[in-house]
Image: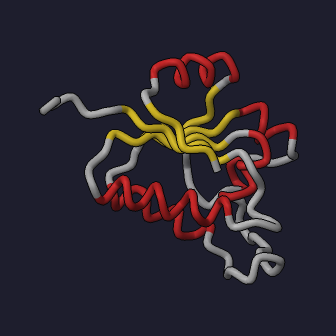
Amino acid sequence: MNDEMAKLMVVFRTAPYGSIYSFEGLENVLIMGAYDQDVSVLFIDDGVFAIKKGMDNSGTGIKDFSPTFRALEAYDIEKIFIDRTSMESRGLTKDDLVIDAELIESDTVEKMMEEQKNFFMF
């Protein structure tokens, strides 16, 4: 049995409006965290809207689940990143978000993705 823990990255790329992808992504992150996996979470492109305060999910029939992202810390998921370009190009600042995550540049995103063993895209 390999004792080395695989690096997993959950990438939120789509807006939480009109689909349940973001909600499903959040559920997957919490499950992985419950099993002590080495999980990184990245919000990029329209995925940054998944952590925006005041989410309007009326189109999905699911209540605003963005505050649940605050539970990531309780699951020891500390590697949470936001692509700075994605956030700023959508007119968002860190004050607009429900969690405090590390802002990273696009070239850092590329390097991080190269280091991962598995991706889960939502």
The image position of residue 39, as x and y in percent, is 40, 42
Looking at the image, which residue is at 26% across and 50% down? 36
The image position of residue 19, as x and y in percent, is 76, 66
Check the image and report above or below for 48 versus 65: above
Looking at the image, which residue is at 75% across and 51% down? 14
Q: Nearer the viewer, residue 121 or 104?
A: 121
Looking at the image, which residue is at 54% across and 44% down? 120
Colour mode?
Answer: secondary structure
The image position of residue 53, as x and y in percent, is 71, 65
Residue 45 lies in quadrant: top right
Q: Is residue 100 left or right of residue 54?
A: left
Looking at the image, which residue is at 62% across and 28% down? 104
Check the image and report above or below for 62 versus 1: below
Q: Nearer the viewer, residue 59 or 102?
A: 59
Residue 65 lies in quadrant: bottom right
Check the image and report above or below for 19 versus 56: above
Q: How many marks?
A: 0
**Residue furthest out toward the front:** 1
Residue 88 lies in quadrant: top right
Q: Quadrant of the N terminus?
A: top left
The image position of residue 122, as x and y in percent, is 64, 50
